[in-house]
Amino acid sequence: MKNTILTLTLSSLLFSCGTKEKTEKEQSIYQTDSTLSIVKAKAMDVVKTGFNAGDGYGEVWIRDYNTFITLSAKVHKPEVLKENLSVFFKLQGEDGNIVDGFIPIQKVKESKGGYEYILNNLEPKYAGHKNTVETDQESSLVQAVYKYVKVSGDTAFLNEKIGTKTVKYRLDWAMDFLMNHRYDKKHGLIWGATTADWGDVQPEHDWGVYLTKDTHLAIDIYDNAMFLIALDKLMELIPEKKTKWQPIRDAVAKNTMAYLWDEKNQKFIPHIYLNGSPFPASLNENEIYYHGGTAVAIEANLLSKAQIKVSLDKMIDNVKRSGAGSIGLTLYPTYPEGSFKNKGMYPYGYQNGGDWTWFGARMVSALYQNGFKKEAYEQLKPMLKRVIDNKGFYEWYTVDNKPKGSGTFRGEAGVLYDAIVLFEKEDSKEE
């Protein structure tokens, strides 16, 4: 009996020491990796200079603002953050829809084939525009307001009136827009145009940002995962709306996995088409793996830990096969040359296989929050390195890791900041 007790005690001690050594080792890695603090400081510097997407854009976009509003709260006063959110509500459509972005009226340049600007008497200073191909503007605004309230504590904002309607009402109205105008009853899911993963460019037009008679309507994982996240945040902000939205939330989550998750291949299918596919029959579209939409689906709590691990393994394998720099690789394999009329959507160009930290870092955060801390850190490292190597937060990267687009892309800064903060919290817990 004594020998048994001694053996158990020694085993317990060895296990305890091993766990402690592992914890201290992991802790020292995070604390001694200076890239975390360097990139965090650079991110804060970038958002000090404004709220437009980056130096290549004049607009403030809600899908971008949603991903760096938490970071912006570190360097801007709450009133400034709230004013930007208020503009989106002031430009809200009569059916509840939310614009993509806004720009000062004096900077508006009307052009044939360009944006159709949206004006509203509630907002004399700014003009809005809406990419009707995408279905994430409403969901992005709900998520952004949630983050603003969380970082500022300004719950009174929800009861402020913009025009004759409170912010609380307008948030609910924005979700109603999706149910009334972007909901497919057959599948119980919301739809948009056909795009590459989370992208906002359809194949049937040279620019590709407006629904047209040639548009092929489709259901995808990104739009529905963003909707689910928004509903969760809305119900937390406005508890009295839970009886309305919880059944819808539960049904959309169930239908997402029933219709979009390919159990055999352990991946999300790219699209369910409502009026045919824009791609030739020779393309087996289900061979394409959507990295960004999968990351957002994990954020929406749609996948089990086992499914998350399989998803990560597939992403890592895709990076190796393509030669890309990170799991921010939008999709793999790419759509073939000529699949999109927009010339920027060539294989490994822009959203057709471009490498976007904007989504890759979201996957890192999702991994961390689901217990894959070591894996999250490994996938974060190349994203941090290229910020330092290229002296900026670039919009996207080529398959051989060369920077493209805006060099002050605030969305990238925001999601990297969010991921870095998770590791900082880990260190403070272990100290």
Image (tube, rainbow, N blue to C red):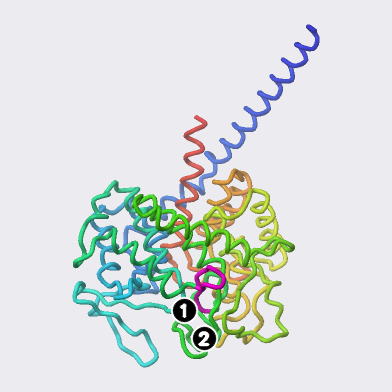
Taking depth in this image into account, of 340 and 39 the one nearest to the observer is: 340
Number of numbered tags placed on the structure image? 2
- The image shows residue 378, relative to residue 116, as above or below, that is above
- Classify residue 157 by image quadrant: bottom left
Q: Determine contact: label 2, label 1, CB under 8 Å.
A: yes
Mark sitting on residue 215: 2
Q: Relative to 35, is 95 above or below?
A: below
| Secondary element at image label 2 | loop
Which residue was labeled with disc 1? 133
Q: Percent from the top left, x then y, of residue 176?
A: 38, 67
| Residue 186 is a magenta residue | yes
Q: Residue furthest top?
A: 2
Query: In the image, 352: left or right of 94?
Result: right
Between the residue at mark 2 and the residue at mark 1, the CA separation in whole angstroms equals: 9 Å
Three-letter code, disc 2: Thr
- Say whether residue 274 is visible: yes
Of the image marks 2 and 1, the number of the one nearer the N terminus? 1
Which label number is shown at residue 425? none
Q: Is residue 37 magenta?
A: no
Picture residue at 52% right of the left edge, 90% below the top: 214
Label 1 amino acid? Answer: Val
Q: Crowding near pointer 1: few (<14 within 10 Å), some, many (20+)?
A: many
Magenta stretch, residue numbers: 184-193
Instruction: Check the image and report above or below for 91 versus 168.
Output: below
Residue 44 seen from this side:
no
Nearer to the camera, 393 or 153: 153
Q: Residue at x 56, y 70 (%)?
A: 187
